[in-house]
Image (spheres, rainbow, N blue to C red):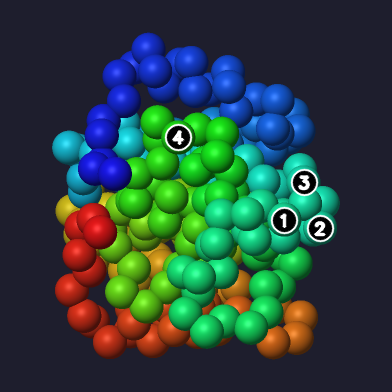
């Protein structure tokens, strides 16, 4: 399905539709991610600001589900087929592929490839990640309701530099975000997280969308 820009009215309606899927705290986080996506989109991707905001509103819709239910959603939508040989799904990141499945099932009018993939990869990124996906990924980390010092610092770095430095700043922020994440992980990191870091450090040009 082609990437489509929802209207302001549709975004207002979507804000209400996602609410039952989220705790109060998670809803506040979601609205804050939407705000960060809008901020970065205005600088980097103005033509897709509304679809980026929709992806932000949908990114955590599986967060309230149990791990079992998340796996059921993933199985139901064959998201594992997209994983190209992956043999495990770490519980901490399962809400991302489950969320992608839930978008397909419960929000089909938003289930274009770019939004589904942005939800799917918002916790790990992936090799060849697009600018669209990268904006959602970074917005999730730097949104201002997060209180960790690393998130606050990266938020300020992005807001001070993005309008002058553009994609170069986005890439630096993403690399720092993933390095911070890897430094705090207990046990083995998800394969995609490591691949994303290598991809970003290689300097390969990011496609804008899928
Ligand atoms: Fe999130």
Q: Which residue is mark 1?
A: 72
As drawn, the label of residue 176 is none
Coordinates of residue 83 in the picture (x, y in percent): 50, 74
Task: Describe the element under mark 1 as helix, strand or loop.
Answer: helix
Give the label, 1 or 3, closer to the camera: 1
Question: Which residue: 67% across, 73% down?
Answer: 89
Label 3, on which residue?
65
Mark nearer the N terminus (1 vs 3): 3
- Mark 2 and mark 1 residues within 8 Å of each other at the beta carbon: yes
Residue drawn at point x = 25 percent, y = 34 percent: 4
Please, which residue is most extreme toward the top here?
Answer: 9
Instruction: Residue 37: tell me if it is visible.
Output: no
Q: Which residue is mark 2?
A: 68
Q: Are marks 1 and 3 in contact (CB under 8 Å)?
A: no
The quarter of the image holding the N terminus is top left
Q: Quadrant of residue 183?
A: bottom right
Horizontal and vertical percent position of residue 175: 42, 74
Q: Which structural element holds mark 2?
A: helix
**In terms of depth relative to the viewer, which is nearer, 101 or 188?**
101
Question: Disc 4 marks which residue?
Answer: 108
Between the residue at mark 4 and the residue at mark 1, the CA separation in whole angstroms equals: 18 Å
Query: In the figure, residue 191 lies in which quadrant?
Result: bottom right
């Amino acid at each position: 399905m082609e990437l489509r820009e929802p209207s302001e009215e549709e975004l207002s309606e979507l804000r209400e539709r996602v609410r039952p899927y989220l705790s109060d705290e998670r809803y506040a986080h979601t609205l804050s991610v939407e705000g960060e996506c809008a901020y970065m989109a205005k600088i980097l991707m103005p033509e897709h600001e509304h679809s980026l905001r929709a992806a932000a509103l949908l990114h955590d819709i599986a967060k309230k589900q149990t791990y079992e239910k998340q796996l059921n959603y993933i199985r139901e939508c064959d998201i594992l087929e997209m994983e190209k040989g992956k043999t495990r799904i770490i519980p901490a990141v399962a809400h991302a592929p489950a969320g992608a499945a839930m978008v397909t099932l419960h929000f089909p009018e938003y289930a274009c490839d770019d939004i589904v993939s942005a939800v799917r990869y918002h916790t790990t990124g992936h090799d060849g990640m697009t600018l669209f996906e990268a904006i959602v990924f970074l917005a999730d980390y730097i949104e201002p309701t997060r209180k960790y010092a690393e998130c606050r610092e990266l938020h300020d770095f992005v807001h001070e530099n993005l309008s002058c430095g553009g994609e170069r700043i986005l890439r630096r922020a993403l690399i720092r975000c993933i390095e911070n994440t890897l430094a705090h992980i207990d046990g083995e990191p998800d394969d995609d997280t490591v691949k994303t870091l290598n991809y970003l450090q290689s300097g390969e040009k990011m496609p804008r969308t899928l």
